[in-house]
Image: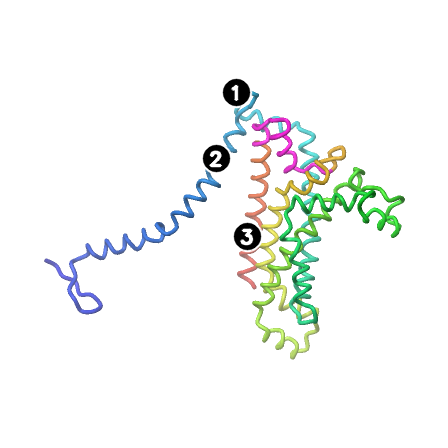
Amino acid sequence: MVMQSTAAGLPQKGGKVGEKRRFGDGFEPWAYMSPALVLLLVVLVVPLIFGISYSFRKFSAFKSEFVGLAQYQAMLHDKVLGEALINTLWWTVASLFLQFFLGLGLALLLDRDFAGKKFVQAIVFLPWAVPSFLSGLTWAWLFNPIVGPLPHWLYALGLRAEPTNILSDPATAMWGPIIANVWFGIPFFAITLLAALKSIPSELHEAAAIDGANPWQRFTKVTLPFLAPTIAITVMLRTIWIATFADLIYVMTEGGPAGSTNTVATYIYVSAFKTLDKGYASAVAVLLLALLILYAVVLIRIRKALVRYS
């Protein structure tokens, strides 16, 4: 019998025990991860497969039939969907822009020591704990000129000719959900960017200050390069969440007036649960999924480049 010596100098049977051990080492991590993998399969993969399969079917009250690509062909001639895509772009870009820069400003502020810092932190992070349905309902009340103060403030500042509800005007209605969404989403950027700021070694700022760098140069040459990878991933995640976020808009405007606040997410909801056209709603959802996957791939590549050269 061929014998092999182990690290302790003891003989070992040739190859078989080592092969079993290597097999066990490879299988053990999967065994530990199996509950999470099964959960992901049940709550993510299976519904995704069913959702995509629904997009190839036409549903009626009592039956469904396979229609192939007919739902996707119908989207090419859907003017409401085209307007919803434009509204989604406006809603997402405006919300993301304001959330990011206000969140970054708050993170930079909270990175410093000042009196009442803990109280300010609690106030800043509070919106993130409020349910989105309640946030939308509260902001709808605030924009109501009968029970809310905001129309009267806008009138006093000269921004409105009279204290009317901006949610009832197609030209300004989208700004209501955008403002509510900015208030709701600022804490996400403030928390994540503050954590990234805390990870930057203070020695780098001290060395830059000794070299004569002013505050703006320290921010652009030291802070931003360290924040860039975090910014890329948080912007990607928040963009996906905003683009698929229908709660605030539906609670505040239900997509109106005249479709001026109708986004792809609200259009999917209305198609699936109001008009009961689950097949077409699934096809629109697949379109939104494909656009967001393409966006995520591009942004992940940008993040890898930032990590490589930071």
Which residue is pictured at 64% across the width and 29% down the height? 274
Q: Give the range drawn in magenta.
A: 261-282
| Residue 60 on image: x %, y % | 57, 21
Q: Is residue 128 above or below residue 4?
A: above
Quarter residue 213 falls in: bottom right
Q: Name the residue under label 3.
A: 301
What's under tag 3, amino acid-wise?
A: Arg
Looking at the rendered structure, the kind of residue marked 2 is Ile
Colour scheme of the rendered structure: rainbow
The answer to which quarter of the image holds residue 62 is: top right
- Magenta region includes residue 268: yes
Does the segment drawn in magenta span residue 76? no
**Residue 65 image offset from top left, x and y in percent:** 51, 21
Q: Label 1: which residue?
A: 63
Upstream in the sequence, badge 2 or badge 1?
A: 2
Secondary structure under badge 1?
loop
- Residue 49 numbered tag: 2
**Residue at point 64% right, 40% down?**
246
Q: Viewer-nearest of labels 1 and 3? A: 1
Q: Which of marks 3 and 2 is in front?
A: 2
**Main secondary structure found in the magenta portion:** helix
Name which residue lies at 63% across and 57% down: 189
Q: Between residues 196 and 307, which one lies in front from this camera angle?
A: 196
Q: Distance between the residues labelled 1 and 3?
A: 44 Å
